[in-house]
Image (spheres, grey):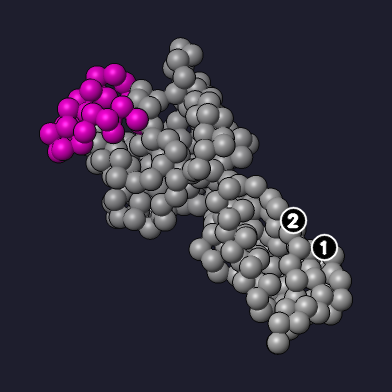
Amino acid sequence: MDFADLLNSAQSSGKAYAFAVITETEGATPRHTGAKMIVYEDGAIAGTIGGGEIEQHVIEEALRCIAARTPVMKTWDVIQSGGLISGSETIYIEPVFPPAHLILCGAGHVAGKLIPLAKMLGFRVTVLDIRGEAVFRERASAADEFILATSFAEGLARIPEREDQYLIACAFNFEEDEKILFQLLQRKSAYIGMLAGKYKVQTIYNHLREQGVPDEKLKTVHAPIGLEIGAETPEEIALSIAAELVQVKGKNKGKDI
């Protein structure tokens, strides 16, 4: 697999990674200018800049770059057996992060209108539902991923948790939204929202309190969802939600999420 394929694989992995490239060499080095590698957030690598001690240093530095969300350029000496320095490599390392991930629990009318807006705003969109595939074909064709599950809990369990996920309960009935919200509150997230009116929100909150969910967690939920713009139609509600997602995403910039 050539490096272009490795890069495409990294970009579609949904993981954060760092791209490392040798920008300058001096003396005897195992690889020359232009050699590249990818270091994933879990420490796995693809490609190589020559192995050995320098490569280990680059992996460690790449993980620091990912954690700090900032690039770096450093020079390392090439140490041969006996401790002799035979050359040096200057390597540029830049962290790359996947797009924020929007997960819609329900493929209803509002979700169908929200998907293209969220895609336009740079979100990766997953739609999860427990109804037939016809629902997906009709309303969710623009999404990146479709999950048809036996239950929303089962479907959510298939999606790895990340702190940059934006989670929305927008199912087809009251009972399902309550189950979904309980599940969402157990996950890491940057945002949790629920499509509901004020009466529904308070009723579900009361039920969740009875199940031991603390008020501190309930206060983190955006419900009723969306900015207050007087929205009524599915298109208008989707717009209000998209605006709220942008608002929260903007506030989260620079945070470790």
Determine the residue positioned at 29% across, 19% down. Answer: 198
Determine the residue positioned at 27% across, 25% down. Answer: 201
Looking at the picture, does residue 95 appear above or below residue 123?
below
Magenta-highlighted residues: 194-220
Q: Position of residue 206 (x, y in %)?
A: 17, 27
Looking at the picture, does residue 23 appear above or below residue 79?
above
Mark 2 vs 1, N-terminal side = 1
Amino acid type of the residue tagged 1 in the rendering: Thr
- The N terminus: image quadrant: bottom right
* Crowd band around label 2 with a 10 angstrom C-alpha radius: few (<14), some (14–19), many (20+): some
Q: Position of residue 225 (x, y in %)?
A: 40, 25
Determine the residue positioned at 80% across, 71% down. Answer: 88
Q: Residue furthest bottom?
A: 81
Q: Main secondary structure of the magenta part?
A: helix
User: Does dot 2 land on a helix, a strand or a loop?
Assistant: strand
Q: Residue furthest front?
A: 83
Label annotation for residue 73: 2
Question: Decide: marks 2, 1 in contact (CB < 8 A)?
Answer: yes
* Crowd band around label 1 with a 10 angstrom C-alpha radius: few (<14), some (14–19), many (20+): some
Q: Residue furthest right?
A: 27
Q: Position of residue 192 (x, y in %)?
A: 39, 35
Amino acid type of the residue tagged 2 in the rendering: Met
Q: Is residue 208 magenta?
A: yes
Label annotation for residue 23: 1
